[in-house]
Amino acid sequence: MAQSIQAPHMRVATAAIPANAGIGLRSRHYRDVLNEQPAVAWFEVHSENYFGKGGAPLRYLEAVRNDYPLSLHGVGMSLGSVDELDSRHLRQLKELITRIEPALVSEHLAWNSFAGRYLNDLAPIPYTDAALTHLATRISRVQDFLSRQILLENPSSYLEYRFSSYGEAEFLNELSKRSGCGILLDVNNVYVSCQNHGWNALAYLRGIDAARVAEMHLAGHSRNAAGERGILIDTHDRPVCEAVWQLYQAALRIIGKRPTLIEWDADLPSWQVLVEQAARADTYMRQNYEQAA
């Protein structure tokens, strides 16, 4: 299991998520989960899908929460932005946390707003001392408001800032150390970014502070044309590819078992396909444990 790195003032969730595979839960599969009670260890949902809502979506989520641990994963906090933190967003997140009592809460190392206008994508930030100070301050404010630790996910990126003074893994480690946040290591994002920028994926994994990694993600990506070469895009619309499965096995050897989510957000497959992807992640975790024993 991942080590707890919560600061003393932060509440520890009561329903811990085990170091097994979970599935990103989308509305299409509510009934599959409730009717079949599948042998899946946990589920993760996008926080914003349940903001300010009652009715059927929240009732389904509460029903699932009765039987499974849950994680909340946000995409709209825009932690890297220079805009003020959105107080309404934070209040709605805190209300959802109080109601659902998730074991983990996570966000992205990115920004997606400027002057009150929001982008439809998660934009990268420069890895500089100024950005570290800015982000650590904002993350600390969020954690103080929520009275709990959050996890930060490494981004999938398609450009680099020439004036960055840290590598991404080094930046994440330092940000976690300064703010007390944990790291959500998205293995697909590591693969996508490393392929796009020519980074060494194994060196990236070895550079991450394993004690600060509390969760992993796996997902599918696609390849788009970009001038004379292709670029990988984190699309979450297909199975995890073989290269990412291989990198995941390396992550297990280097970092160890962690709760691992199968993300699939577009062109959703049948429920059984998701269960099979989760089972494959569980198999690799079990094999890694047996080899280490």
Image (cartoon, rainbow, N blue to C red):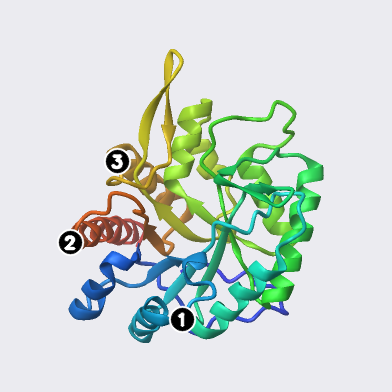
Of tags 2 and 1, which is closer to the observer?
1
Left or right of 95 in this view: 79: right
Q: Is residue 206 toward the left or the right of residue 272 in the image?
A: right
Of the pair 212 and 68, the residue shown nearer to us? 68
- Nearer the camera: disc 2 or disc 3: 2
Residue 215 percent coordinates (x, y): 48, 61
Question: Which of labels 1 and 3 is toward the front?
Answer: 1
- Element at badge 1? loop
Q: Which residue is mark 1?
A: 54
Compared to residue 165, the image places residue 64 above or below, namely below
Residue at 59% from the left image edge and 72% from the top image edge? 93
Where's residue 46, x and y in %? 46, 64
Q: Amino acid at mark 3?
A: Cys
Residue count near mark 3 (Cα–Cα under 10 Å), binned few <14, some 14–19, many ≥20: some
Q: Is residue 215 above or below residue 251?
A: below
Instruction: Decide which of tag 2 and tag 3 comes sooner along the chain.
Output: 3
Residue 262 position in % (x across, y down):
35, 57
Q: Nearer the viewer, residue 265 or 217?
A: 265
Quarter of the view holding residue 191: top left
Q: Which residue is mark 2?
A: 272
Give the Cα distance between marks 2 and 3. 17 Å
- Residue 250 sits in which quadrant? top left
Placement of 238 over or under 8, stated as above or below? above
- Disc 2 or 1, which lies upstream in sequence? 1
Q: Position of residue 228 (x, y in %)?
A: 43, 12
Q: Please tell me the numbered disc located at residue 278.
A: none
Label pair 2/3, CB-CB below 8 angstroms? no
Residue pointed to by mark 3? 241
Residue shown at 70%/64% (left/top)? 180
Q: Label 3 near label 1: C-beta < 8 Å?
A: no
